[in-house]
Amino acid sequence: MILLDLTPGNWIALAAIVVPILGGLIFLIFRVGGLHSDIIRMIPQVGKIPDIEVKVTELWKFRMAKNESPLVLNDKGITILNESEIKQIVDIKYQDILNKVKSINPPNAYQAQETVVVVVKDLISDPGLRNKIEAGAYKSGVDVETVLFVGALYVRDKILLELNLIPANIDKDDPSKKIPT
């Protein structure tokens, strides 16, 4: 047997290989155990993520819109509107956007605003517009979602008026701002 025929120098060399490997395995076992306990401790915090997401989304909107009610594009939003060319895209697709919003038949100004945002955000799924929207986002230095949100704010009031809804009533109809009776 080869193992029994090893010289003392070979045994030392073999030990120099085996001991670090065993040490590394022991270290990994303890490290993985520590990670597992860290993950177990974080699980209750994961439930709070939707609340944080809502807060971040609300703060994100104010990067492009004035903190007024209803939201109105600020200087940055107007720059994005023009540089990204979403204004031209929304103008060209206006009738399609209006028809989709009408087909949903939102009952009030707030729901109409939210519907406009959803319909405009869906423009990215149009293969003929996808590259143009992405190029516009790149050109204006923001992400696609921001460009589409700016486009939705740009066209919102015009669509609300076509639906015989008053943009100033958006807050009045916002369920998060209603006072319980």
Image (tube, helix red, strand yellow):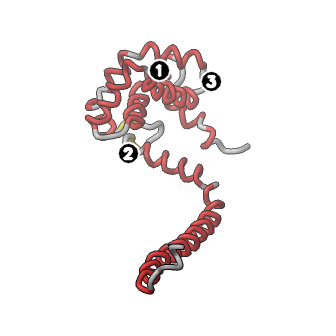
Residue 96 visible? The answer is yes
Q: Estimate the spatial distance between the alpha carbons at disc 1 and disc 2, rounded to whole Å.
A: 23 Å
Residue 157 visible? The answer is no
Residue found 58% across the figure and 15% down from its top: 103
Q: Which mark is residue 159?
A: 1
Residue found 42% across the figure and 34% down from its top: 149
Amino acid at dot 3: Pro
Question: Which of pointers 1 and 2 lies earlier in the amino acid sequence?
Answer: 2
* Lateral position of residue 59 relative to residue 30, left or right: left
Quick one: SS at disc 3? loop
Q: Residue furthest right?
A: 181
Residue found 49% across the figure and 50% down from its top: 56
- Mark 3 or 2: the one toward you: 2
Q: Nearer the viewer, residue 91 or 166?
A: 91
Q: Label 2, on which residue?
A: 63
Quick one: SS at disc 1? helix
Local packing at callout 2 (Cα closer than 10 Å; few below 14, some 14-19, many 20+) is: some
Place of residue 22 in the rendered image (x, y in percent of width and height, measured from the top left): 53, 75
Local packing at callout 1 (Cα closer than 10 Å; few below 14, some 14-19, many 20+) is: many
* Lateral position of residue 162 relative to residue 72, left or right: right
Q: Label 3, on which residue?
A: 107
Place of residue 13 in the rendered image (x, y in percent of width and height, measured from the top left): 42, 80
> Vertically, is 1 above or below 162?
below
Question: Which of pointers 3 and 2 lies earlier in the amino acid sequence?
Answer: 2
